[in-house]
Amino acid sequence: MGKIKRLAGETVLYGFGSILPRVLNFLLVGVHTEVFAAEEYSVLTKLFSYVALVNVVFLFGMETAYFRFASAPGADEKKIFNLAQTVIVCISLACSVPFLVFSHPIADFLEVAGHEKLVRILVVIMFMDAITAIPFSRLRHQHKPLQFAVGKLINVGLFIGLNFVFLYSSYFEPKVDYVIIANLIANAFFVLMFAKTLLQWRPQFDRQISPKMFSYAYPVMLTGLAGMTNETFSRLMLDKWLPDNFYGNISKASALGIFGACYRFSVLMSLAIQAFRYAAEPFFFAQSNEKNSPQLFAKVNHYFVIVCCLFLIGVSINLDILKFFLRREEYWAGIDIVPILLLAYLFLGIYYNFSAWFKITDRTYYGTIITCIGAVVTLIGNYFLIPVAGYTGSSFTALLCYFSMTVICYVLGQRFYPIPYTVGKDLLYVICTTAIVYGVYYVDKMLGLSSQVVATLFHAIVILVYIGAIILIERNGFTEKRA
């Protein structure tokens, strides 16, 4: 278990650098849903969804390419860093200029007319994110999770503090513009943090390595683009494909705001996945040449599934409390979609684990194919389900998309890089956990647990029994001395 314990330790530290800041950021949902009505919040939902999509192009898959080539035997890490940074700076500059020049028509196209200034600010934010991405990746490659964590925590501290200043101070009128301005100021800290690294960077091109890195990275970028389509498409199209008066007196813009706010609860699962990926990606590359790596990867995935199931049950059965983070009751209308989205993200996390095979074997184009299939599922699913089921239909589409990607990735992976995953046992964990979640919902409703204290106590007992059952089932694996 030694290598898994090291991975777990780094995951905890990366958690402080990625999970904790974004959990704190999640708490801002309470601030934003108190200050902004659902229709106003929909502007943030839409703009940040587009940013997430475009940001993939700015990064161009170079983070993964950097890990792959910097981890190669005998690699010159400094040279690889310069090569990767050069690509990112060139691409992000080439993308930023037209966005800045044509911000007015772009705002009209995005249906956020009058917010041209916000479009320009978001472009600057994306550029800063892009040029600091490889420096952050370098910290991960050099196993410096503490520096990674401190930087992320300072950034989110600035962002949260500025949100309170702008939205609650009598000197400013509360508006969505200030949320994005706060983001700009907070992200400028990253540039200061890596000022020395950025100043030491020298534009570089290698006739042999650069084309290989580019060829390796662009399928990753396409995969990320398709993946981000899966992530954001429902929020981009909900107000377009939702029939008029679908939710009665709730406007389509308000429905988007409700969906966007409730969608944020799924972040609680995606954050755990992200922290794990920060530690696991370099771990998988480093262990890929070991004789027992397939067995090790299978064990890692098994424990990953267990942890995600704990997140699924812990969040889902306590939504009766967690919903109060959404300060206005109008947002509570969409709370039932949260367990569906959490389950969807659980399968996305499993997919990321399964995807190690095509990164290790340099068949990243399979990742593009699989994720594009997922994007097709997303497009078709949302097109047909939004008109009949609204944002619930979008949530089920996300689940279908990520489950399909997981199955396809597993089948192909067993052909090219066989790994003895405990599929049956892992799937049983997921099914049983989901059944318990909805079983608890049924019991709550059947017994009419109107007292919050009684309901919370019941939910706590369920979670403790669930954890006890896991310890009992996995006791032999937990006591192993070696992976």
Image (cartoon, helix red, strand yellow):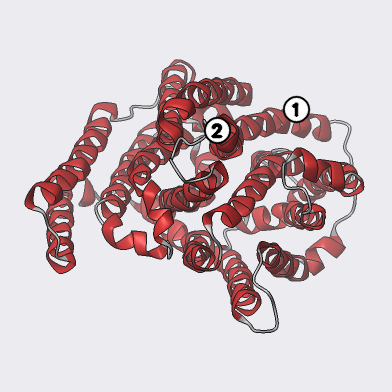
Q: Is residue 461 left or right of residue 202?
A: left
Judged from this view, the residue extending furthest toward the bottom is 170
Residue in view at x 69 percent, y 78 percent: 172
Q: What mark, if any, has residue 215 been given in the picture?
A: 1
Q: Position of residue 246 (x, y in %)?
A: 45, 35
Residue 139 visible within the image: yes
Q: Which mark's residue is nearer the viewer, 2 or 1?
A: 2
Figure quadrant of residue 389 = top left
> Where 46 falls versus 139 (above or below)?
above
Q: Position of residue 62 (x, y in %)?
A: 72, 41
Figure quadrant of residue 298 = top left
Q: Position of residue 416 (x, y in %)?
A: 49, 18
Name the residue type under label 2.
Asn
Number of dots carrying numbers: 2
Residue placed under numbered mark 2 in the picture: 230
Residue in view at x 90 percent, y 46 percent: 97
Name the residue type under label 1.
Ser
User: Which is more N-terminal, label 1 or label 2?
Assistant: 1
